[in-house]
């Protein structure tokens, strides 16, 4: 920090050249940041702020470096400075939300993530994070809205359909969940969990044969996934096919699935 003071000895607020000198330090700090020279980049960003206390970009980049260093308290403070100087800067809210979440301040993190999404309507990462946060808090309708907004920005990103489908599943909208899992599978046909997710929605809607078809295909993708044998065994049970159900529970037990013994005891008398 002393180096920054020396560099900016002539950078007082009365100096008409202060903004341009501040920008020079900022540009140098950015170059050092890209070369992963974090300590020197911090010195330059501090110098830029010393030259021009309104340089919100310098506060933002300084905060970003401090976040990389794990200095979350100072990082939060400098992201806040950037926000005060440029209250429409979505990235500053997004990054400050991440620090709040790491620190256990879920309320603050949610507030900032919502602000980031409102500042930049097509801010994909913020929309996705907002949906994830709402989902974890059980705010399923709000999560669906956030994921829908994110899908508008990135309709080709299959995980968004998976997450929105999971919300609908928890809301007992099984048809809506199936529609989302259909989209997930269409975009990622080799992704195992798409078929597992859709089979769960089919089973919840008591469409056990459709669920079986998905589980059978899932097991062709990964025959070592023991949970698929548990799920398929349950489908067989509800279809009245006890022998097939018990065979699948037995396979799952041999694969060391922790719940297999309970299913064998409950449904097979073993």
Image (cartoon, grey):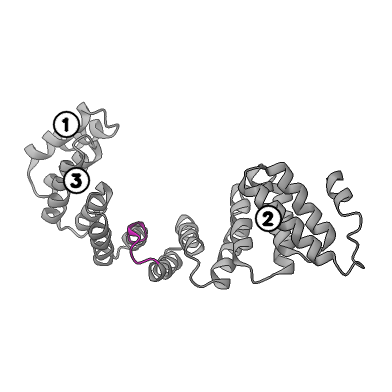
Q: Quadrant of the N terminus?
A: top right
Residue 250, by quadrant, is top left
- Left or right of 183: which side holds 57? right
**Eye-nearest disc, 1 or 3:** 3
- Left or right of 14: which side holds 172? left
N-terminal of the two: label 1 or label 3? 3
Secondary structure under the numbered disc 1 in the rendered image: helix
Does 158 appear in magenta?
A: yes
Residue located 17% across and 42% down the image: 219
Residue 36 spot, x, y in % from top left: 63, 43
Instruction: Please tell me whether residue 266 is drawn above or below residue 130 in the rendered image.
Output: above
Q: Which residue is mark 1?
A: 251
Mark 2 is surrounded, within 10 Å at the Cα level, by few (under 14), some (14 to 19) or many (20 or more) other residues, namely many
Q: Mark 2 and mark 3: span between their CA atoms?
A: 46 Å
Does 148 appear in magenta?
A: no
Residues under numbered marks 1 and 3 in contact, where contact means CB atoms less than 8 Å apart: no
Residue located 71% across and 53% down the image: 28
- Stretch in magenta: 154-161
Secondary structure under the numbered disc 3 in the rendered image: helix
Instruction: Please tell me whether residue 194 is drawn above or below residue 111 in the rendered image.
Output: above
- Left or right of 247: which side holds 113? right
Q: Which residue is mark 3?
A: 218
Q: Mark 1 and mark 2: span between their CA atoms?
A: 55 Å
Q: Which residue is mark 2?
A: 61
Residue 262 spot, x, y in % from top left: 25, 33
Residue 104 visible at all: yes
Residue 251 spot, x, y in % from top left: 16, 31
């Amino acid at each position: 920090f002393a180096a920054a003071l020396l560099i900016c000895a002539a950078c007082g607020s009365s100096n008409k050249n202060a903004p341009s000198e501040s920008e020079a330090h900022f540009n140098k700090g950015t170059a050092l940041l890209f070369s992963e020279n974090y300590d020197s980049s911090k010195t330059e960003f501090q110098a830029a702020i010393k030259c021009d206390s309104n340089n919100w970009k310098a506060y933002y980049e300084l905060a970003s470096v401090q976040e990389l260093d794990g200095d979350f308290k100072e990082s939060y403070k400098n992201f806040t400075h950037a926000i005060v100087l440029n209250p429409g800067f979505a990235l500053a809210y997004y990054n400050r939300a991440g620090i709040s979440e790491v620190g256990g301040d879920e309320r603050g993190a949610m507030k900032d993530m919502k602000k980031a999404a409102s500042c930049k309507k097509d801010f994909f990462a913020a929309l996705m994070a907002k949906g994830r946060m709402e989902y974890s808090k059980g705010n399923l309708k709000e999560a669906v809205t956030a994921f829908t907004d994110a899908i508008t920005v990135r309709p080709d990103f299959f995980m968004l359909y998976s997450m929105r489908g999971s919300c609908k599943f928890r809301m007992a909208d099984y048809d809506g969940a199936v529609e989302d899992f259909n989209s997930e599978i269409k975009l990622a046909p080799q992704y195992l969990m798409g078929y597992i997710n859709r089979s769960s929605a089919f089973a919840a809607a008591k469409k056990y044969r459709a669920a079986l078809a998905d589980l059978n295909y899932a097991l062709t993708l990964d025959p070592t996934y023991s949970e698929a044998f548990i799920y398929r065994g349950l489908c067989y049970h509800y279809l009245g096919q006890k022998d097939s159900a018990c065979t699948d529970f037995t396979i799952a037990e041999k694969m060391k699935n922790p719940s297999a013994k309970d299913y064998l005891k409950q449904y097979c008398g073993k």
